[in-house]
Each structure stands twice: as C-alpha cells, then as structure tokens.
Image: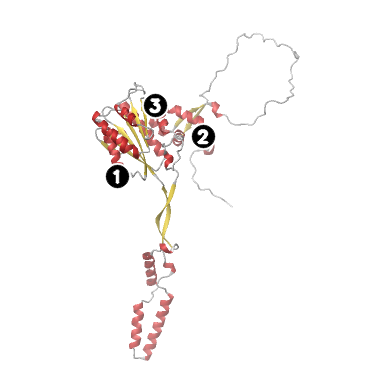
Amino acid sequence: MHIIDRRLNPRGKSLENRQRFLRRAKDAVQQAVRRSLQNRNIRDVLDGGEVTLPIDGMAEPSFHRGEGGLHDQVLPGNRAFVEGDIIPRPPGRGGGRPKEAGEGDGEDGFRFVLTREEFLAVFLDDLELPDFAKRRLSETEEMNPIRAGFSVSGSPSNIAIARTTRLAMMRRIALRRPKPAEIEALQREIEECDSEEKRLLLEAELKSLTDKMRRIPYVDPVDVRYRRFENEPKPVVKAVMFCLMDVSGSMSEHMKDLAKRFYLLLYLFLSQRYEKVEIVFIRHTEKAEEVDEETFFYGQTTGGTLVSSALAAMRGIIAERFDPTEWNIYAAQASDGDNSYRDESATGHLLQHEILPLCQYFAYIEVGEEESDSSMSSSPLWSLYESIRSELLPLAMRKVCRKNEIFPVFHELFQKRQAKATP
C-alpha cells in the first residue's frame, strides 16, 4: 500500500526542531523580545528580527553519572610522592593569584532570528483584552443554520414544494404522460361513435393511454426535493474597539508619534489576537470624524480641541451600528491632556454617564514631550478623568513621554488578568 501525503508544508526547513526550540526556550525568547522592543521602531515589529539569547538558557537535558559513591582509580606516573607529602610550587611561576573568570549571564553566545509571526506570537503571548472573560469571543462559537441549496432526502417539514412540482412537470413532459383532458376527450368520442370498428380502436387507444398514465405518476419520489441547510460557525458575541486620538494644534509631532505608536501597537494586537473584532477610528480637533486606518495614522488635519466631540461621535456610532446588548465595547483614547475649559462639563457628562456604562474597558493614554517626566503635573483632561475614575467604572489611565515607555505601558494595560466569575 502506498500513502501519498499531499498536505502543504511550510517553506521553513527543520520546522519541527524550530518549534520545539521555541517552546523549550520560551521564557528566554520572551525576555529577549521585550529587551529588543524598548527602542525599536514600531514599523520594525512587523518584520520580525534577531534576538540575543544567553547561552545559560540554552542548556539541554542530558544523562550523566551521579556524584557520590566509592570509586577505585589508578593514576599512573607518580614516582616522587607518597601519601602526606607537600607538593612544592613549580619553579618560574609568579606568586600572584590567577585572574578569576567574570560572573553573570553572558549575552554574546547565541543569536536567533524570529519570523514576523513568531515575533508577534511571543510579544503578544501574555496580553488580552481585559475582562473579556465576561463573554469569550475567540473560542466560543455557535452553529447557525444557513440555506445551502436542495437535497433528495430530508425532513417532510423541509419539502420544497415549488422545486418538487417543477421537477415533476419536467419529467411528465419528457415521458409524454397523457393529460386528463386528452382522456376525457377520447371518452366523449367513444360515446358518440356509431361505427363498431372505430369504437374498438378508440377503446384500445384509451386503454393504452390509461395504462401509461398509471405507469407515470403525477409526482414520483425522484422528483421530491428538500430544502438543505448547513451549519455555519458564528461567534456567540462580538466586540468593537474604538480608537480616539486628538490631532489638534497642541499636539506636537513627538506626541502624535507616541499616540500613533500606541494605536499601531493596539491595532496590531487586536488584528493578531482577535479576528472577529471591529475597529473604529475617530480623530478629533474641535470636530470629530470617523476615518479609515490610513487617514487616522497619517492625516495632516489640525485645529483646536474639544474632547466631547469625539465622545459624542463614539456615542452616535454605538447607537447606529453597535447594540450594547450584542457587542462588547472597548475604547482607547490618546491625548496631550488639553481641552477647552468650556468643554469640561460636556466631556465629563458624556464619559461618565453615556460612554463608560456601555464599555467593558476604556484606556486613556496621555502623551507628553520627551524632555518631560511621566509624573508631570496633571492636565485639565487628566484631572477631569481622575475625578471620574472609580472601582465601579472601567477606566484606566497612564502617562507616556518617551518611545521606550510605549511597550511597558501597553503591556500593563492589556496584560492578562484573573478571570472573573459571572452569573
């Protein structure tokens, strides 16, 4: 017997060995990836890259003789010493103490190149949307029956009457089944016929037509068709992620770059981790607008700042397209903290009473200049959000000033948490 395996294999050679190595050195690879991301350009994350692993973390298990026990050894070549003798110092050697080896883990021994998929899998391994245990998205699915044509077998309740009737008519026409009107006309002709010879011929023809009608049923079992259904996997719940960004004139290029890095990372995370998540991009100055990904990241719009416009736009989109009873709603906002004084009341009301009650998680990232400290003085928007934040509301806040703070803050916001019991 010959077996031919036609499954498509990945291009990488020694794939099993590579995957086995990644599983064995998972902790070391994760630490190396974290270090390499500190000052790395966000675009480079999409390309994978080389990471350095300490040799100590590459030790493989092996079998060896255990220590202890009694050992008899024969050491040939000793002609000058007996037990108890003191061995003199070899001549010509200095009395100094030999230099000791350095201590600590080395990083120069092993370099490993990760593909894009491997790099992202390692980086995003311990991240997830907070409180997503409420209604699991990525794993739980239900089967939804959808129409899939017709079948020759099935339940009587699923009989397709129109299709069955059409097929029966096509078969009767093809087999030339006599029509009832033809038989009735022939019977009337027999009754009115005076010639005995002709009447016998007509009776023979009538018998032939009657027998043919009896042999060719009006509806045959081969004509019957049933409506066919197939089960299509359907997510039990759906999630939407709102990305809100301030693009006003108070946002410097450095701040916008930090915000864009955070959202690129967030977008990358969601696209990689949850395939069934809708993402809505909203940018705002004094006016808010929903835009596509390209415009959100690279648009040149600028102006004043009214944060309430973005929250109002989010509220309108939720009301129009995302029913909170069917969708898990998440939001992330990036801003420098500036907002018009006259807008604080509207912003606070929208966030506290209309946005947060609908959200499972709302993350606010406040960006600052590179020279400033992450513990910078509170901005108007930060103070407003701080007054709203409580244990009962799903609001998280962080400050970022430098590029190398993006990944730790992102990791802190979206690290896995203990699943909560739900009724």
**Which amino acid does the dot numbered 2 rest on?**
Leu
Real-space CA distance between mark 3 and mark 2, rounded to the nearest whole angstrom: 27 Å
For the residues marked 1 and 2, what is the alpha-carbon distance in whole angstroms?
A: 45 Å
143 sits left or right of 388 in the view: right
Q: In the rendering, at what x and y percent does residue 46 appear? A: 40, 34
Q: Position of residue 110 (x, y in %)?
A: 52, 27
> Which of pointers 1 and 3 indicates the residue nearer the eye?
1
Q: Disc 3 residue type?
A: Glu
- In the rendered image, the quadrant that contains the C terminus is top left
The reply to whether discs 3 and 2 touch (Cβ–Cβ < 8 Å) is no
Image coordinates for residue 323, horizontal then vertical, percent: 33, 45
Q: Residues within 10 Å of mark 2 (few under 14, many from 20)?
A: some
SS class, disc 3: helix
The image position of residue 268, as x and y in percent, is: 39, 36
Sequence-first tag of 3 and 2: 2
Horizontal side, residue 93 vs residue 336: left or right:
right
Q: Using the image, tell me which numbered label, if any, was put on residue 405.
A: 3
* Precedes in sequence: disc 1 or disc 2: 2
Mark 1 neighbour density, 10 Å: few (under 14) some (14–19) many (20 or more): few
Question: Mark on residue 320?
Answer: 1
Residue type marked 1: Glu
Q: Which residue is mark 2?
A: 22
